Every structure is written in C-alpha cells, then in structure tokens.
Amino acid sequence: MVSHVTDSTFNSEVLNSDKPVLVDFFATWCGPCKMLAPVIEEVAQKMEGEVKVVKLDVDENPQTSRMYGIMSVPTMVLFKDGKPVGKLVGFNPAERIESALRGALGI
Amino acid sequence: MYDIAIIGKGPAGISAAITAHARNKKVIVFGGDSKKLLLSPSIPNYPGLMEIKGTEFVKRLNEHLASTDAVLSKKMVTAVYSMGGYFAIQAQNDMIEAKSVIIATGVDFKKSIENEDTFLGMGVSYCATCDAPLYRGKTVAVVGYNKESIEEANFLSEVCSKVYFISMTREPYNFNENVEVIKDIPVKFEGHMHAQKLILKNTEVVADGFFVIKDSYPLTSLVPGLDVDGPHVVVNRAMETNMKGVFAAGDVTGRPYQNAKAVGEGQVAALSAVDFLNGRDK
C-alpha cells in the first residue's frame, strides 16, 4: 500500500527523506487519479528500495499543493534531497513513470 | 472485457473490425461516420469502386460493419489508460475494458492554440470535471469548441467566481450570471512558469486557469504514454506502437491520407492485435 502524506508530515516524510520520494498529488473526485492509483502501486512495488512512493490529497492539503504549483491532477513530483527534480502531469503508464524515475535519478 | 477496442469508425477502423470479427474476436468500435468521407463528392481511386460517392462508400462500409457482431458506441473516447495487462477506455461517463486497442481516429488538422501544449497541466486543462475544484473561487477562461464546452463552462461557473467563455461554437447557450461570453479568436497563451493570460486577436483574457474543450485532443492526452510524431502515431509495418497491445491504422499513422491505405492498415492492425491476443492467452 502506498502511504498518504499530509501538509504536516510532508517535511519529515518527503523533504527530509534519505531516499528519493515520488509524490502523487491526487484528488478523490478525479477520474484519471483513480486510474493512476493501481499503476502507482505497481511502480512502488517495482521500485521498492530505490524510490519511496507516497500520495497527497490536494483538497485536504492545500498548503503543499500550492507551494509546488499543482494546477492539474494527477501530478507526480519527484523529490530528491528536499527538492523537486521532476514532474509528470496526468495519467502515465507504469513503464513510463518508471523510466522517467530512472532517467531523473540516473539509476 | 473486449478483446479489441477500435477507436474510430472510418475505413481503417471498420476494416480492422471486419478482420477482427473474422478471427472470432470480441470487438467494440467507437465513433461516428467519417466526416471527411461524407464530404467527398467522389472517390476516384478506390480499386473496384470507381468514382463512388463518399456518402455511398460510408453506407456500404456501415452495411459491412453491421454484418459483423462488433458492438458500436457513438460515445466520444476521452482517454485510453494502460493499466498493465489491460486497457481502460474512458468514453464520456463509461469505463470500458479491453485487452488491446486499435487507434483509427484519423488525423486532426485543426491547430492548437500557440503554447497550449507547453502549458498543459500548468494552467491549461482539457478536463473541467478533473480540475475545476483546483480553481474554487478563482477566475477561469473556457475556450469552447462544442456543446460539451457550454455544459463545462456552466459547471465551472458553479465552482469558480468568474468564467470567461471564448466561444468558438455556434451552439446556443444559456449561461449562469457569472459567465462572460467573449467573441474573439484565441491566438496564444502567455505566462511565466504557468499560463497567466490568453492573447486573442482583439483583446486578452487574464485568468487563474484556462480550459480548452474541443472534440479531439492531442494523441498524447488521448493515450498517455504513446510515441507520436506531430499529429501521427509512430508505428512499424505490423502497425504496432511503442505500447504493447496498442496498434494504429489509417490517416493517424501518416500520409498518404487515402482510403485504400487506411483499409489495408486496418487489416494489418487487426491481425497484429489477434497475434498479440493469442500470444498473451497462451
């Protein structure tokens, strides 16, 4: 299960993580977000040990969403050493997310 | 779950459906009659049907299609999601599942607004239902090309404080009070990091978000993950795309934009899909 992060846990779970973190900014009412959910699970399993994958509900956590300029859901942002290093907007198949992650992290 | 979902009911899509049916596959075909064909006064070069009228050709294609047991849907496909092992096809409010997909949508000559693709997801959205709540209490603009865009603008006006509607359609409208209609031609989006204004021929609109609602969307948003080259899908001779289980045929794969080429490709795509399905089920 991909765990959820919030405005209050974002610092500790994402920005201060020793591993790169992929954050799936989603909303409960968004169709493509629902389709992405099982895909994100698959990516999390495949990349286990290399990338941590978490989800953030944009309605419940407006502060973080605003800070990273989320204007469309789903949006996936990759964080490394506390900084956003890559962004994917909209639904993407698992292979594409994985190759984008490997490309951005050089792994 | 369907074996093959065919997106598009032009010559390529119908040809694919006929072959897939002959191979005993469960098929669904999305789309309406090819507008391009219906508008052809005469087709000079389709072998065996010299100077057939476009309308007559469409009629015959449909008769042939009706002789198969392919399921037909007039619903507009908005997205094809690769779920790993199967595809989920969003057709308006329906979600249909298929093991393989053939894209036979034809090619769209309509130009996008300048910078539309650059700002997609950064202030420009194709989906009001998806992104409206992100603009709660804010000002948005809708560039509307069809009937749906009018419904979407009204939906947005319930969530947003102000909606500008740039009307590119002749459909009648009955908007809520906070919708302002602008009759002008969109030229380009401008902004730093995200879209902040839309330049029109005679004026400009500043808004927090922009929604472009039209009948066909770029292939990359129709099928996320698909390799494209401009308005065309990249395919090999077997009509395979970069995505396993996704094939393409007809005008959407590139020139020449000809019926004979489209039906040939439709057949190849269907046979490749059948091979893919047979290999997969083993």
Image (cartoon, rainbow, N blue to C red):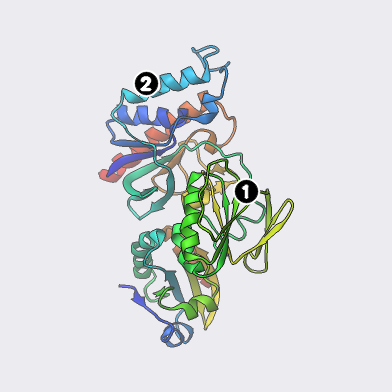
Q: Quadrant of the N terminus of chain A?
A: bottom left
- Amino acid type of disc 2? Glu
Name the residue nearer the viewer: B33 or B69. B33
> Looking at the picture, how far across and down is residue B90, in whole percent?
38, 49
> Looking at the picture, how far across and down is residue B71, in whole percent?
31, 34
Name the residue nearer the viewer: A56 or B234. A56
Q: Count of labels shown?
A: 2
Left or right: B54 as drawn, with respect to B194 = left
**Quick one: label 1, few (<14), some, or many (20+) residues within 10 Å?**
some
B31 lies above or below B219: above
What is the secondary structure assignment of the residue under circle 1? loop
A13 lies above or below B243: below
Can I make out residue B225 in this image? no
Can I make out residue B135 in this image? yes
Whether label 1 touches label 2, CB < 8 Å: no
Task: Specify the subunit that label 1 lies on.
Answer: B
Mark earlier in primary sequence (1, 2): 2
For label 2, the residue is: B63
The residue under the point 66% across, 62% down is B197
The residue under the point 65% across, 49% down is B183
For label 1, the residue is: B112
